[in-house]
Image (cartoon, rainbow, N blue to C red):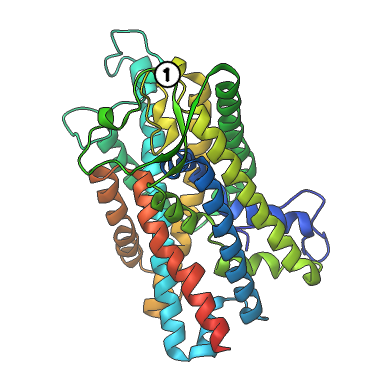
Amino acid sequence: QELILTKIPGDIDPCTGKQGSLTTIFSVWNAMVGTGLLTIPWAFSQSGLAFGLLLTFIAFLISFQTQYFVMVTAGRDSDYTTTMQKTFGARGWYAGMVTFILVLTVPIVLYTQLLAQTLYPILKLVFEHQGLIAAPSTPPSASQGIGNLEMDFSQFSYSYTCIIVFVALMLLGQLRDQSVFVKINTFGVVFTIVIISFIFYMGIHGLRTQHFNYDLYKERPAKGSSVAAESFGAGDPTIFMVSMGYPHLLGILGGGYYLHNISIPIYKNSKQPKNNLRDIFLGYFLVFLSYSICGVLGYYGFQQPEVFGENVQIQQNFLNMFDLYYMPAVFVRVCTFFQLLAATALIFACQRGQILQFLTGSQDTDSPFANFLVSFGILIGPLILAVVYPHVGRLAGILGAFGGFLVIYLLPTLTYLKQ
């Protein structure tokens, strides 16, 4: 419960520890909206403006409906695996545990990659300032981005940063006390607001200073086509209403609207349970508004020729579009890094506990070696993917679609129908 509650000052009963509606609503919002916003502008550029808004709204309606199924079927259960065991027997418990372990792997994969992509330009900036690596010979500009992310061990690179992140997470995984990350995570709302504000600023700046062309439909680029072939030509950027790259957005929303089984500790602590459904709906609606606003404004804001150059393509992580020395982006990167570090450490601890529970019947172990093996098994896959496939938007689409299908569409619906 402490890992996912966003406690609003004055909204917690000091005697009972129960929370009011504001804490429930913002906990729901903060649990879903966060650093995933880094990929939303790219996803909207792939789906088109109007189609992106429509898909975001449809996904919101379906996800809230199945969230309602979870609340109805869970009843007084404190864990959804217990609900599945009651409904389907022992097979239900095993199916639930395996599913939730697989689904929790998704944010670990994505956050590991985002951590590396966020830390790399920060370290590179520090190393250049200290003279440890050569500074660029030409004056930097925002349009230069952070450079190549492809695998490269010939010099300090993003690939080495992935290894640094892996080692750091392995060391953090050995800590028994996660309270410091709980405290950092309580600032998640502030860090998320920083990201949204930055997208908002870029979008409004683009709308005020840039002329955009509009077109109804964009076909999916031919397989193997180059970036130049996908560009729209020199001049004003084009905003498409519908584009055939929409599966990326649907996949990202599959992870972006996921709350279901982890919502139970949030609403179970409410002072007024009768308001739970309303509060969960309001939280979901704030998530829908956040994705919609950031998608639309990001689509406009991150293809300004005066900032990024002609024929700009929105990158899968929009922060990668900014040079190391662009100070607003540096500030957002630092905020994003701390939010990612805290969230990843906490999710990592939950995942380790789930795996140990599944294998041994206990969420903890006294064996440092067993703890090391479980931690290594959790992180080695995300490390390899981060190094060899640094395309976080496409990964979020693929993995989000897989995880969302299981925990948003399949399990809640089957459990509801069975009961």
Q: Position of residue 290 (x, y in %)?
A: 61, 45
Q: Position of residue 313 (x, y in %)?
A: 37, 30
Toward the top, the furthest residue is 138
Q: Position of residue 35 (x, y in %)?
A: 50, 44
Is any part of residue 133 visible from this angle? Answer: yes
> Which residue is located at x 36 percent, y 77 percent?
359
Amino acid type shown at disc 1: Ala
| Label 1 element class | helix
Look at the image and tell me in which quarter the N terminus lies. Answer: bottom right
Compared to residue 352, the image places residue 216 above or below, namely above
State the image quarter where residue 158 is shown.
top left
Q: Position of residue 96 (x, y in %)?
A: 45, 77
Compared to residue 103, the image places residue 134 above or below, namely above
Q: Is residue 217 left or right of residue 188?
A: left
Residue matched to label 1: 142
> Which residue is located at x 21 percent, y 37 percent?
151
Is any part of residue 168 visible from this angle? Answer: no
> Which residue is located at x 57 percent, y 16 percent?
209
Q: Residues within 10 Å of mark 1 (few under 14, many from 20)?
A: some
Q: Is residue 398 left or right of residue 56?
A: left
User: Count the marks: how many?
Assistant: 1
Compared to residue 1, the image places residue 188 above or below, namely above
Observer-nearest of 13 and 282: 282
> Which residue is located at x 37 percent, y 36 percent?
117
Look at the image and tell me in which quarter the C terminus lies. Answer: bottom right
Q: Is residue 1 left or right of residue 146?
A: right
